[in-house]
Image (cartoon, rainbow, N blue to C red):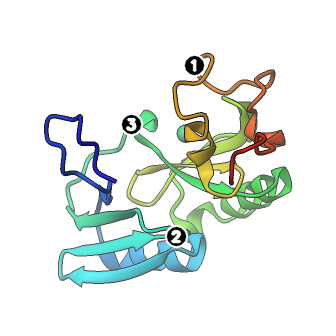
Amino acid sequence: MANSRAALGCINFLSHGTLEARDLDRTREFYENCLGLEVVRTSPRSLMIRLGGNNTIAVVQNPKKPAMPLLNHNGLDVATREDVERCHKELDANKEKWGIQKITKPADQHGTYSFYFSDLDENWWEILTNPPGGYAWMFSQGGDLERWGAGESDKVNPNQYKPREGTRR
Ligand SMILES: [Fe+2]
């Protein structure tokens, strides 16, 4: 819903971000056959990807794209710590097959259990445990969280996330 108090006042959906890829055919193969994302070819130079919702990422071909910094990563949610371990094992054991450039070890961080990897395009991803709806729970209070982040001791740690009374998942 558009926020009428904002200066622009008519923006109603954060629809997409963008990623660059060096070779769209190889990238598509990785997204579909390894990550299991939904992929649509939108032009000779672009793909659109999504999974689990309607926020999308447009993937644009740039053979000379530079490596992405880790902080710019995108998140891929799984339900359990075991899922994180399983994904890590698959990627770590098949780095060459999938073109994995770098991979970190799974760790508890910012309230989730996760690891990061840099893919065939040197784009960083994080595979993390999250409740259904990802970080949507952070907006369920209708305001800022009590403190920044979501540490292990937070009442709203997503690893043990339970909807508060009166809130919906
Ligand atoms: Fe993250």
- 85 relative to 75 in the view: left or right: right
- Identify the residue at image location x=79%, y=59%: 83
Name the one closer to the observer, 140 or 84. Answer: 140
Q: Position of residue 87 (x, y in %)?
A: 72, 60
Q: Position of residue 30 (x, y in %)?
A: 49, 73
Dot in front, 2 or 1: 1
Q: Disc 2 or 3, which lies upstream in sequence?
A: 2
Mark 2 lies on residue: 51
Dot in front, 3 or 1: 1
**Image quarter hosting the C terminus:** bottom right
| Amino acid on which disc 2 is placed | Leu
**Image quarter hosting the N terminus:** bottom left
| Amino acid on which disc 1 is placed | Trp
Dot in front, 2 or 3: 2
- 110 relative to 136 in the view: left or right: right
Query: Which residue ends up furthest to the left in the rendered image?
Result: 8
Q: Residues within 10 Å of mark 2 (few under 14, many from 20)?
A: some
Quadrant of picture, ligand 1: top right
